[in-house]
Amino acid sequence: MSAGFQPGPGDRGKASHPGFAGVSHGRNRATMQVCSGLLALFASFSAVFLSGCRSDMQDQPKMYPQRGAALFADGRSVRPQVPGTVARSQGKDDLYQTTGMVDGKVGDALPFPVSSELLARGQERFNIYCSPCHSRVGNGKGAIVERGYYRAASFHSERLRQAPLGYFFRVISEGYGAMPSYYSEIAAQDRWAIVAYIRALQLSQNAKTSDVPAGRAAEKLVSLESKEGFTEEFLSSWGVTRNARTDGAAVQAPAVAPPTVAVAAVKTDLAAGSKPASIAAHPATTPTAIADGANAPAKAATVAKATPVAAAPKGDAAAGAKLYAANCSMCHQPNRAGLPPVFPSLLGIVGRVGEAHIRETLISGKPDAKPPMPSFSKFSPEEVDDLLEFLRTK
């Protein structure tokens, strides 16, 4: 401030003099610097703390179920059991009961005798866990399907009527396509109870007159409609043929046998509510190893003596790669990782389901899948061998 200038009362707060301007601007700059520093500090803290509070969990790093993983060469995020190790749950005495497998192949037996209590338990568990998709009669038209979800598989298709019992146990345990695993929700014994009830459902809608136990009479369901006062639409809404017959009694599933085998051995006292000690033995009543597929010829074999089937002749992997690129890659992806759960991964598929299952699927397709898989019956046996050899590659 100059020595010759003394501000008067009216000059207070004015910045007309150079001295006043210097003081005012200095204070403003200091204030702005402090504010800028506080804003920078606040922004830094916000970046640190708010980054951990993101509401969009989709962007967080994590593994997705049934998605490929780049960490492993085979692209699988769920790892197989370490070779040479045994889990505590894999007790030797109850191995079949917990896996449904015989020497790595699907078995076709229940691990314990069938009883009315077992079927009642299976029906209860089925109605809770399975009927929302598969319906209470197993025709794949459950409540959520009627509301727009993918139609579930019908247990009355020829493929599933011929499937071994262990196949259903493994699907319940591990899931299949869009169906999740129920391993943690349903105990192993209850899973087998559901399997027994599924076979009973199959028999109930695919039985012959000769299957009716001795001393029982069969009548058409049309007669039952009239007797019980049902409308004609009642049975059609359940997908049941009106000309089918019923004897009005519950039918118990055999311990071992595809649904086409007669069930004359079923004890008639089941209808009265008594508990049979066991079902009469079928000629192949021990757990039978199914050779890598549901429709392969069954061979009577004990759990300890199942014999693996010899591998098919090797094909040309390079030729198989061309077949895959032209026919399969648009759904299952060029890297074979698929788009689960709609299009399953084919990585390691030969080892997981076996050659026979893949051959049958290629020839017959999967019309009950969502979306349905077409048949590739145009492939020659040599081309199928080539495709299998390609699917074996890592």
Image (cartoon, rainbow, N blue to C red):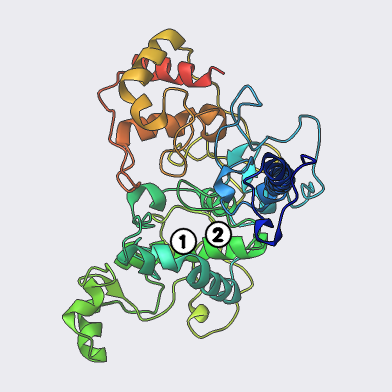
Structural crowding at the residue carrying mark 1, measured as other residues with C-alpha within 10 Å and reported as few (<14), some (14–19) or many (≥20): many
Q: Secondary structure at mark 2?
A: loop
The image shows residue 304, relative to residue 8, as above or below, that is above
Q: Residue at x 45, y 20 (%)?
A: 388
> Which disc, if any, is residue 255?
2
Q: Residue at x 57, y 83 (%)?
A: 274
The image shows residue 282, relative to residue 249, as above or below, that is above
Look at label 2 and name its amino acid. Ala
To which residue does mark 1 refer? 199
Q: Secondary structure at mark 1?
A: helix
Q: Position of residue 353 (x, y in %)?
A: 52, 35
Residue 79 lies left or right of residue 359; in this view the side is: right
Q: Residue at x 50, y 66 (%)?
A: 197
Tell which of 239 and 28 is nearer to you.
Answer: 28
The image shows residue 323, relative to residue 246, as above or below, that is above
Q: Position of residue 308 (x, y in %)?
A: 60, 29
Q: Residue at x 71, y 39 (%)?
A: 304
Quadrant location of the C terminus in the rendered image:
top right
Camera sees residue 84: yes
